Image (cartoon, rainbow, N blue to C red):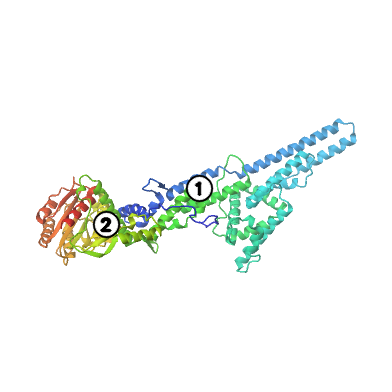
Amino acid sequence: MPVRYGFRRFGEGDDFNDLDVEEMLRMLADDFMENGDLEEAMDRLLREGYTTTDGERVEGLRDLLEQARAKRRELEQQADPDGEMQRYRDWLDDIESTEDDELDALLAEAEASDDERRKEVTRGLVDQKKMQRDLMSERIGERLGEYQDYEFVSSDAREQFEELMAELERDVLNTYFEKSKEMMGRPDSEELARMRDMMDALSTMIEQDRRGEELDPTFGDFMEHFGDFFPGAESLEDVVRMMAERAAAAEAMFNSLSPEQQGELRSMFAGMMENMELNFSLNRLVSNLRMATPDIDWNRAHRMRGDDGSPFADAASVAEQLGQLKGLEEFLGQANAAQGLPEVDVEAIRRNLGDDAARHVVRLQKALQGLKDQGFVDRQGRQLHLTPKGVRQIGQQALRDLFAQLRDSPTLGLHRVASVSRGGDREETSKPWQPGEPFALNLPKTLRNAVLRQGPGTPVKLHADDFEVEEFESTRRSATVFAIDLSLSMAMRSNLVPAKKMVLALTSLIRSKFPRDFVAVVGFGETAQELKIEDIPALTIDYAYGTNLQHALALSRHLMRNERGERQIVVVTDGEPTAHLLANGEPFFAWPPVHETLEKTMAEVLRCTKADITINTFALDIERSQFPFVEQIAKVNGGRLFYTDVDDLGSYALDDFVKHRRAG
């Protein structure tokens, strides 16, 4: 969409200090973890908009697209060039009727007199006038030109004709030049000469610029003489864009008519411009404008079928706005909103859809830019990626949500707050406080953060982001591997996203609160593989069958082989083992599970138990997941077994982890 001149800086007057980029990341993350494509998730969020935590609706591009379409349909009913042509025809008919009445009255008076000479002269005059008018063209443009040389008998008809021509000249000029709105009567010769000089000077500059020559007149000289025609323009490009969009709108107005109507209207306009000695200068300028703005569609046409006629200038204005709306519709409707949003012309939105729509666009733009500026997302080539910082932020958000759920839960509220191990010495370090952590405040650093944020002066107002807490050396280390079921049933039952949120939350907790702990993630379906924590949000499930818990336990045990202290595997699954590895390393799958699969899986449970590795299992979907095998795992290994639904998975896992990490 072409960038149009503007009179207002981007975002000027808009205050979005309440904009919560983290909240937008939260909404983006939910979709992203569900579908695994950040670009598509971003597009959906930008298209559909969102509702803030305060209940404020931020309209998306889809809402704006519908507004643009509705506005276009409304405008199409507000202009009718042919109706305006008919108004001038009717007006001229009234003038001719007034002239006819005057001629008839003049002849009647002569016939009533006894003066034969008067009768003869009057009959000749009347016959001459009627013959002159009978020979005039039926086309209104040509007919108006012929009336220019006609001497009216009726003074009323002559005055009406002068009024018609004055209005028509203003209308024609205003179709191309907004400046002509200031003309109350017919433009005088000096005004027309100045307008002609402006067009010639502008054409000269465009031609010189196209040839790469120095401008003469310079742009400054041009604006000194003709700047009142182009309010707000700051460059030759601005002036060219203003004139080109207006001229293209006039062309669109012509093109909206049938070929016959269009020919008549063009003829009338050409005649009026010729009469004002502007036709050559205008044609030269329009030709230069066409070459200077290849991005403008000069052949576009709009459906303008208003019920009543309106000035041609108004029809051109409607055509200009319809052109902008068409461009907006194409832009708002294109694919990949995340890439296109920064280029949306906010001023075009403001002009056509109003301030509220513009504010929504600016808010979306600032939210998208905020995600990039704060380092949560990044674009590599044409692909949008979640950064490691963004993954950590999503994990922290998930952790805060789980702590809030624990705090509000009547059954899980016994272990609401995690605490650091107090058995070690205080370290000479501090860290930003996270919700759910103990409040061992480092006052000097907290105050320093507040002063840096708000500047000098008192009182110093503390914000949650200012808090820094002391770090303590932990008396022990632990190792945790999260083994997540990636079988097809996890996706079909909508269990995968809560499992991913739980992993992100607990890994965020471990990394921030227990930085010396070992943590890893294993995903298992047909086979098992180690997963990078940064890849968890985009994790999706392949269409491969199997729940290979044997391989998952073996890989988890291998990852912790060099770790000391407490070691645990947290298994999240919604089914019994249905796959195992053969001697050649190939996976074997069978449903229902065969004895060999259960046997090999239990053998790996025994190896973990012998290695003093605890296996804690979260069995999802209580009605489907009361599996004897997971109960056997708990009995053999001594780990804990939780039957939980997907909504409580994260809370149970967090509660159990915090409780037993503290107890150790």
* Residue 383 location, quadrant: bottom left
Where residue 239 appears, as percent x and y from the top left, is: 60, 58
Q: Say if 416 sits above or below 212 in the image.
A: above
Residue holding disc 1: 354
Q: Nearer the viewer, residue 456 or 32?
A: 456
Instruction: Tell me the tag on residue 321.
Output: none
Q: Say if 293 sits above or below 314 in the image.
A: below
Where residue 375 appears, as percent x and y from the top left, is: 36, 61
Please name the residue shown 51% across and 44% down the image.
73
Residue type at mark 2 is: Leu
Q: Is residue 406 visible?
A: yes
Q: Would you say 452 lies left or right of 310 here?
A: left
Where residue 555 appears, as percent x and y from the top left, is: 18, 63
Q: Nearer the viewer, residue 590 or 540?
A: 540
- Classify mark 1: residues with Cα within 10 Å, few (<14), some (14-19) or many (20+): few
Q: Would you say 120 lies left or right of 218 here?
A: right
Where residue 132 appears, as percent x and y from the top left, is: 78, 43
Q: Nearer the viewer, residue 602 or 571?
A: 571
Q: Would you say 264 lies left or right of 632 here?
A: right
Residue type at mark 1 is: Gly
Residue holding disc 2: 504
Q: Is residue 590 visible?
A: no
Classify the position of the C terminus by image quarter.
Answer: bottom left
- Contact, CB < 8 Å: mark 2 with mark 1? no
